[in-house]
Image (tube, coloured by chain):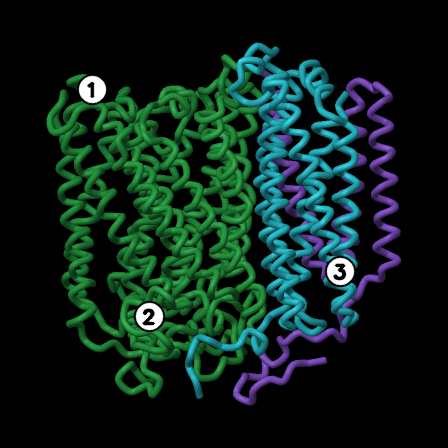
Chain colours: A cyan, B green, C purple
Amino acid sequence: MSYSKNIAPSEHHDYLGSKMGMWIFIFTELFLFGGLFLVYAVFRSQYATDFHKAAEETNTFIGTLNTIVLLISSMTVAMSITAIQNNQKGRAIRLLLMTLLLALVFMVNKYFEWGHKFDLKLYPGSQVLTNLPKGELLFFGLYFMMTGLHALHVLVGMILLTLTIFRIKSGRVHAANFSLIENSGLYWHLVDLIWIFLFPMMYLIT
Amino acid sequence: MSNSETHPQGSYLDNHGKYKGLMGWLTSTDHKRIALLYLYCIVIFFFVAAILGLSMAIEKMRPGQDIMNAQTYNGFFTVHGIIMVFMIVIPGLAAVFGNFALPLLIGARDVAFPKLNLFSWYLYVIGAILAVLSQLLKSGPPDTGWTFYVPYSSQSTTSVIPALTAAFVLGFSSILTGLNFIVTIHRMRAPGMTWFKMPLFPWALYATAWIQVLATPIIGITLLMVIAERVLHIGFFDPALGGDPVLFQHLFWIYSHPAVYIMILPAMGVVTEIFPTFSQKPVFGYGAIAISSLLIAFVGYFVWGHHMFTSGISYWSKWFFSFLTFIVAVPSAIKVFNWISTLYGGSIDMKPPLLYAISFVFLFMIGGFTGLFLGALATNVQLHDTTFVVAHFHYIIFGGMGFAFFAGIHYWFPKMFGRMYSNRRAYIAWAFTFVGFNLLYFPQFIIGVQGMPRRYFDYLPQFQWGHFLSGIGAFILMTGLVLMVWNLVHSKRHGAIAPSNPWKGVTLEWQIASPPPVENFDEIPVIKHKPYWFGKDDRE
Amino acid sequence: MDLPVPDDVPDNLKKRPMSTEKQHISTNTSHAVVLIILLSLTAISVSMAELHLGALSVAVALIVASIKGTTVLTYFMHLKYESLFFKIMVGGVFVMYLLIIIFLFFDYSFR
């Protein structure tokens, strides 16, 4: 008997345990953003009018577009899992690439959105921001911190999905071993879920 | 059964697998080796922080400046707190004894995610390095206290950001360990081991793991917010920019209160393993202890405001948090009754583990009772920010979790290292530790009530007697700790060879060799009996 | 479609390797339908934001977002087809979070 700790993962791979682990990680992410939502809730309640005013500065069109982009990307990643489970390797990869493309569109939109704000000298620490009414200042602080942290998670999600594509190509991920794509999909849906709440909070309170 | 001399596989301490020697340890995903990696780091950093504590006690033995100035003193209590809280007591029991014993207690070969387990340890080390870095950089060690209250933490010119980052990384390590343990307990129990056939240390670890997973992210984001304050002037906590400093306190304590349950629940779990073994009798009220662990974790989430009674929060808020603080004491009290009842009528063997476990109950109760004075609104006004609070939490954390750690290391030492330590030296060390501890902290209750503030470098002459006694106590305590560690380190090499079951325990770890083989069990056991079944016919 | 398992793996571990026998596979149609629902809810949310409901606008926005979120959790994240334990876990986490907000506002609402 070999007592090496390098047991091949597939022999002892616990699919349900792996999924459970990913869900628990998702809970930690929910609470991470949850802390920021708490801050938002407190200041929204204290500076309702200022928040309302500041939100006019956010571009509802791009925000809605980004929401649609993320929702579609959730569908494409969900479909890619269905494809893998049905042994449709090529289709799965195409759908994941589609998801990545949509993620990229999201990030590009974000780039232009933030760029526009920077052009208006609206960023934390700027003189323009300091001269605004306090509630508006706080709104923009929250805006940058929350969308920034979210964008970071979009990037992480993109890396995970890319890794998944490579593993599908190499044959390590397939119909009988699809934890990676399912867990990456769960992570991606988390990113979408956070945006579902961010969107109205940042863009729709006018 | 066999010991390490005769088991054909050798033990987990011998070289196995691809790498030998130090590299074998640094790349090992074996939960037992990872437990020891944590143990060695924790012992080293504990002594660093303890020496800092001793230095502060020495400084305060006389009023005025003696061996350090005020700024240094502030830096000392800050880093003492950061190390003790984030590197010793929060990870301590779970990372050392949870890692070592959990898979053994549930009949598994390892945790659910062994590689993630090793990664958790690496994160711990990185966090530790960052904490050390914060002490060495040119901007000087942080002087904010481990609680990093704004506005000072956003303004202090010291190395606050490395310290905040250290805490963030250490928190991530804690989260991943919690995640690992939850899945391990759900998925890797031996066949036949239903939830209510599981021993109580795993129950405690389970409750703890949920707190680790759901509370730590909040401090993670809060620390990031303070960094954002310092770097970007984001304004959440700055009144000049419309923010609220009390909001920081809320967010900080929403984690840091549940964090104390991360500290104490595994401690309670450890002593709950020790009491039945050294009474040779099942745990009294198994179900009550299991459920009260979960209740403590749940209710403990909602008492954070009791750290903020004098911060300006609303009356209803204070009322509510005080009420829940009294409620959360109840499950802990239930446990104390259960432990004493476990001892009652048992065949008591006062070996060092039991001595430390009983000390734990005594010291924890003092800490717990004094918590009631702090939890009551009226008395809190007098006592907040005095040394009464310092004494309270040292009794609970050091007297509680610390002594439980000592109990655990004396309990599982034969299993971990295959050697027995000298009982006589252990008792002597205990005596110094116990006497020193009480002499160090009890006077702080009294001068605290009399008005001695905490975190103060200097004080009025009427408080000197208390500080002086504390200083003596600190020396005695340190002697005891050094004796204790020396006994164990010496016995690791020179102690008598340990049998597989030196304490006549009935949980699974005692049914395998000391030290265990790499794979733990030759065959995964099938569980038929209730936990803590001592072979008496009234149980099945 | 089980993977081959070595002989010396104990029985209780042999049951572990992944099999797709009892896995629920969502259909592409269901995914598409869910997307349509989510897009519709988004449209509702955006148009309701135009309506100037005052204090009610927060509640409406949050409710719509919650419905969208629940839809993503239930279908895209497959919670509907997972065991009861997963559902309780997720529900419990949201309840915990809600309680934290409520207790936080015991301070802020009554200052």
Structural crowding at the residue carrying mark 2, measured as other residues with C-alpha within 10 Å and reported as few (<14), some (14–19) or many (≥20): some
The chain letter under disc 2 is B
Residue that mark 1 sits on = B459
Question: In the rendering, at what x and y percent does residue B513 appear?
Answer: 34, 79
Mark 2 or 1, closer to the camera: 2
Residue that mark 2 sits on = B24
Circle 1 SS class: loop
The chain letter under disc 1 is B
Answer whether labels 3 and 2 touch (C-beta < 8 Å): no
Amino acid type shown at disc 2: Gly
Answer left or right for B187 relative to B415. right
Circle 2 SS class: helix
Question: In the rendering, at what x and y percent does residue B247 appear?
Answer: 52, 25
Amino acid type shown at disc 1: Tyr
Answer whether labels 3 and 1 touch (C-beta < 8 Å): no
Question: In the rendering, at what x and y percent does residue C34 appear?
Answer: 85, 50
The correct choice, above or below, for B526 with respect to B213 in the image is below
User: What residue sits 63% from the left and 36% below the top?
Assistant: C99
Residue A94: which disc? 3
